[in-house]
Image: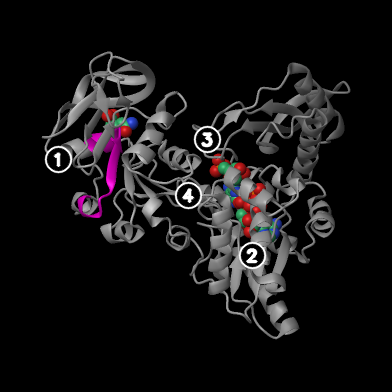
Amino acid sequence: MGSASASSLPTSAGAGENLVLILDYGSQYTHLITRRVRQLGVLSLCVSGTAPLSSLAELRPRAVILSGGPHSVHAPGAPSFPEGFLDFAADAGAHVLGVCYGMQLLVQSLGGAVEAGERQEYGDMEVEVTTPSSALYGEGEAGKRQTVWMSHGDEVVRLPQGFEVVSRSVQGAIAAIEHQEKRYYGLQYHPEVTHSPQGMETLRRFLFDVCGIKADWKMQDVLDEEIKTIQSMVGPDEHVICALSGGVDSTVAATLVHNAIGDRLHCVFVDNGLLRYKEKERVMSTFDSDLHLPVTCIDASEQFLSNLKGVKDPEKKRKIIGREFIAVFDEFAQMLEKKIGKRPEYLVQGTLYPDVIESCPPPGSGRTHSHTIKSHHNVGGLPEGMKLKLIEPLKLLFKDEVRKLGSILNVPESFLKRHPFPGPGLAVRVLGDVTEGNALEVLRQVDEIFVQAIKDAGLYDTIWQAFAVFLPVQTVGVQGDQRTHSNAVALRAITSEDGMTADWYYFERQFLVDVVKKICNNVRGVNRVCQDITSKPPATVEWE
Ligand SMILES: Nc1ncnc2c1ncn2[C@@H]1O[C@H](COP(=O)(O)OP(=O)(O)OP(=O)(O)O)[C@@H](O)[C@H]1O
Ligand SMILES: O=c1[nH]c(=O)c2[nH+]cn([C@@H]3O[C@H](COP(=O)(O)O)[C@@H](O)[C@H]3O)c2[nH]1
Ligand SMILES: NC(=O)CC[C@H](N)C(=O)O
Ligand SMILES: [Mg+2]
């Protein structure tokens, strides 16, 4: 299965010389390092910490950041660099910064010592710069203190030859180290989290002052490069189909590909029977009035729902949905072949970086949860042996980056500001068998009341995502003096930057009072409303 993806951006953008590679050893914060580097205007990519050396060398990174991770470097099977990594970095003149586990790994590999510390450091900690001149902190900083975020049980107790300690925690643990000549650096704390207020400054200094990288990663360049890549990939007579949901990602992807190949792009919107209240009508009319892209709507609801009948397992549901989507796209390709005399070979999807990270964490990354969290229907849920080749121009971007790209492409705000809605739709919001009773219909009504109330209260743009969940449990209520035995539903509203982590949204009491009253008064079959007040982690955003 081909895809306009991973390697197209860095190499074709000529970004190799200003590319930062993040080697992932399973930290919860790995993707945040990737984001922070990008926020500084530098392209960064995250790959498995144990990926083969050849795949790293191909990308010609200027700097490599080794992430933190849950393992102890002494534990059997603890992940380590690819064979020959340090020689490669030395020969290529790449700078290496180890963060937490990454620093411990660097130290141990170069002959220093790491031990289980007597004191563990979790949370806020003061560190003090111990040297008048250092690469990571600059000149004249000796004695200055800053608050940082620590999260480690092991600590470096002996440095390899040639290294210098440049800061220590106030408890005495080594907090930052350097070997400027060999271009090795290490931070025991996490500069990427906001709890390290000066962490961004340290990363900035590392990238620009130490590595001499230029901030040349701009959305306009990403756009120009992607357009060129697509034009060179799709032959002049070839046609492409695009799975368009009306969500942010596929709308931006479709607009981008339309800019590249014009009317050889054919968009399809699938009614999978799992859409929200009046969604088909609303989305199809905005495609027409605001987007000016021709879109074919295929009603495949029977097909999706009959295949989902009796299926309770969330992963099985996701896989079925992935498979049925592709079946519909194949059918659409056949329809087009009859109409235009040529079968489209490519499928555009609005896949994002988080879909990829969460669907398939890098193998051997050493994550404690080193398995699939959930198969996003458009990534892990795709059937083997599908014929269409993928074009996924957003595959390396986070949601907020896609929104920026969309505004350069003049995608209307009505699309860019929409809350995300997962491809499997209400199937991951009706727990268990989605076809049981009238669960989908009940959920549509509850969800509409909740989201409309959020819009009426002027909160829609403050909240990242809001929706209702149908719980397959019945509870006892009293309505109109009568005993009821009806369903419970849950409301979830979150704030987030990129969907990778999230906080629950705190509503005013009166807002909730009004919403709950409206739901119970208007939706037959619901007598109890709960609010989900779990962040991600430990929960995920969707319930399935
Ligand atoms: N109903 C649908 N019809 C056609 N394609 C769909 C549908 N739902 C999802 N897709 C495809 O699956 C991809 C992933 O869905 P996802 O929900 O992540 O993205 P989106 O809908 O474009 O944006 P958003 O995350 O803002 O909802 C979409 O980009 C689109 O290509
Ligand atoms: O296109 C999608 N296909 C999927 O299979 C899928 N699963 C979750 N999501 C959306 O991704 C974000 C993170 O969700 P989770 O914390 O539930 O994984 C949230 O914004 C979810 O709505 C999906 N989007
Ligand atoms: N956050 C980390 O990278 C922790 C590294 C290692 N597991 C420790 O506890 O010291
Ligand atoms: Mg969507």
Residue at mark 3: 501
Q: Label 3 sits on what residue type?
A: Thr
Looking at the image, is mark 3 or mark 1 nearer the viewer? 1
- Label 4 Cα crowd, 10 Å radius (few <14 / some 14-19 / many 20+): some
Give the residue number, with chain letter if any, for mark 1. Answer: 110
Disc 1, SS = loop
3D distance between C-alphas at marks 4 and 1: 33 Å
Tell me if label 2 and label 4 are in contact, CB under 8 Å.
no
Q: Where does the image place residue 270, in percent across and percent down from the top left?
A: 72, 61
As drawn, the label of residue 257 is: 2
| Residue that badge 4 annotates | 216
- Residue at 72% in and 65% down: 268
Q: Residues within 10 Å of mark 3 (few under 14, many from 20)?
A: some
Q: Position of residue 242 (x, y in %)?
A: 66, 65
Q: Residue at x 78, y 57 (%)?
A: 291
Q: Earlier in the sequence, mark 2 or mark 1?
A: 1
Q: Are marks 3 and 2 in contact (CB under 8 Å)?
A: no
Q: Amino acid at mark 4?
A: Asp
Whether pointer 4 and pointer 1 mark residues with C-beta atoms closer than 8 Å, the reply is: no
Residue type of the residue flagged with mark 2: Val
Residue 183 visible somewhere in the drawing: yes
Tell which circle, 4 or 1, labels the residue nearer the N-terminal end.
Answer: 1
Q: Foreground residue, 420 or 413? A: 413
| Residue 340 disc label | none
Asked if the residue at tag 1 contacts the one at tag 3, i.e. Cβ–Cβ closer than 8 Å, the answer is no
Q: Quadrant of residue 243?
A: bottom right
Q: Residue at x 74, y 46 (%)?
A: 413
Query: What's the amino acid at mark 1?
Result: Leu
